[in-house]
Amino acid sequence: MRRATPHQLGSVCQRCAAIPTAAASSSALEPLAVRALLASSPSRHATHNVSSKPAAARWMATATATATTTTQANEGAAASAESKLAKALRPTKDPAQLATSAVDSYNKFTTVVDERPDKDTTMAALQACLVAASSLHPHLRKAEGQAKASASRLALLGAERKGANFQISAEITAANNRISQTAYHIITHPNVEMTPDVLSLYVHTQAQLGRPESLPSVLELYAHKAKPVAKDGVVQYVPQNPNSAERAIEKPVADLALQTAIDAKNLDAALGITEAAFCVRAFKRQKLIKKTTAPAMALASLPFGILGLGTAYANYWQNTMDVVTATGIGVAGISGYFFVTGSLGMIAKLSHKDQMKRVTWLPGTPLRYRWMREEEREAMDKIACAWGFKEAWRHGEETGPEWEGLREYMGYRQMILDRVEFMQGMN
C-alpha cells in the first residue's frame, strides 16, 4: 500500500480548510442583527457547556434530566427571541393599509360608543390611530427627504422661511389625511369623555402626522366639552366648568402641541395653542395650587416656629433679661431675618431674566403677573425664535406682515419683542 508524503498531507489539509462548512456559510448569510441576537442567546453556550461536562455513573440520570430541561428552556428562549426579531425586521405596511386599519378601529369604536360611553374602547381606537401614525411617520420623512433632495437651494430657503410643504405622493397624503380625520372624529364624538390620557393620545397622533391645524380647537374642546354619563340606559351630558383647575392642560402635552405647530411653520396654530393652553384661568389656577400650596403651608407654620425659637432663646441661651423681654427680642430678630431675606429671595426669583431670549416683559408689569404668565411668555419666546433669524447678530432685522403682526400681538399681551437694551451688542 502506498503511503502519502507529508507534502501531500499538508496540501490536503489546506484544501479542506479552504472549503467553507455548511454552518459557516449559513451563519455568513444571516443578517447582522440575527447573528448578534443568536450569539448573545444563552442556548448555544448552554448546550456546549452541558455536553462538555463529564458525568459519573452514579449521578448520570440526574445530570441528563437537568441538561434536557436546561436545553429545552434555552431553546424556547432562543425561539422567542428570534420571533421577536423577525417581527421587528418585518417590513412596515403601505400607507393605504395603515389608513385602513385606523378607519377599521373607528368603525368598531362607533358600534360600541354610539350606544353608551366606553373609555376602554375609546383608548383602543386612539391607540390604533397612534400606531398607524407612528408607522406612517417614516414614510412621511422619507418622502419629504426625497422632495427636498430634488428641490433647488432657493426653494429650500423659501420653504424654510414660509413653512411651505413639498409635494409628496398622493397615497401618503391621503393616508395622512384619513388618519388625522379619524382621530379627530373619535375625540369629538359626543359620548367620548375628554380626559388627560385621551388628549395626550390625540396630540401625540397629530404630532406624528405633523398636522397641528385641529389642535387649538381640540384644546378648547377639552375645557368646554360636556361629560357623558350613562344612567338607566340613557346617556346624559353633564356640563363642565372650563375655569376649574381640573380642566387645565398639562404642560408637557401643551409643549408637544406647540412644537408640532412650530415644526409645521403654522403661526396661527401656534398662537391658538398658546391661548388655549396657557392663557386660560384653569391653567393659572392649577399652577397656583401646585406651586403655592407647600410654600403657603410653610409660611403659615413659620410664626409658630419663630415663637418656639424665641422662647428657647429666652430660657436657655441668655441670663441677662427676664423671659418675657428676651422672648420678644428673639422673636423680633428672627422674624426680621426671615422676612427680609425671604422678601429679597422672592424678588430675585420673580424678576430673573436668564431664561428670556427674545421676548421680555413690558416695564411696569407686576411681578405676580410675570410669575403667573411665565409659561405664556416662554411659548411666545419659542415662536419668536422659530420665525425669526437664527443668528443672534441679525435679531431685529426681521420684516414682513407676519413678523409685524407677531410684534403687535405681543404688545397687547404686555410683552416686548427684541427689547433694544437686551439685544446683543446694545448693552
Image (cartoon, grey):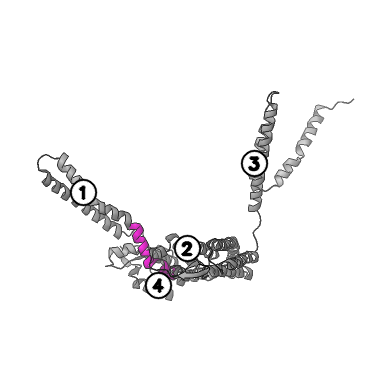
Secondary-structure class at tag 3: helix
The alpha-carbon separation of the residues under discs 3 and 2 comes to: 46 Å
Amino acid under disc 4: Leu
Amino acid under disc 2: Thr
Of the numbered discs 1 and 4, the one sitting upstream in the chain is 1
Q: Per the image, is 86 magenta?
A: no
Q: Which residue is mark 3?
A: 39
Q: Which residue is mark 1?
A: 306
Secondary-structure class at tag 1: helix
The alpha-carbon separation of the residues under discs 1 and 3 comes to: 67 Å
List the single residue furthest toward the front: 232
Q: Which mark is residue 195?
A: 2
Of the numbered discs 1 and 2, the one sitting upstream in the chain is 2
Nearest the eye: 116 or 332: 116
Q: Judge depth for marks 3 and 2 and give the one in front.
A: 2
Quadrant that contains the C terminus? bottom left
Q: Where residue 95 sits: x, y (%)? A: 63, 65
Q: Residues within 10 Å of mark 4 (few under 14, many from 20)?
A: some
Quadrant that contains the N terminus? top right
Amino acid under disc 3: Ala
* Number of disc labels: 4
Q: Judge depth for marks 4 and 3 and give the one in front.
A: 3
C-beta proximity under 8 Å, tags 3 and 2: no
What segment carries the magenta color? Answer: 271-291
Residue for point 37% across, 61% down? 286
Residue for point 36% across, 61% down? 287
Of the numbered discs 2 and 4, the one sitting upstream in the chain is 2
Q: Which residue is mark 4?
A: 406
Quadrant position of residue 243: bottom left
Secondary-structure class at tag 2: loop
Q: Judge depth for marks 2 and 4 and give the one in front.
A: 2
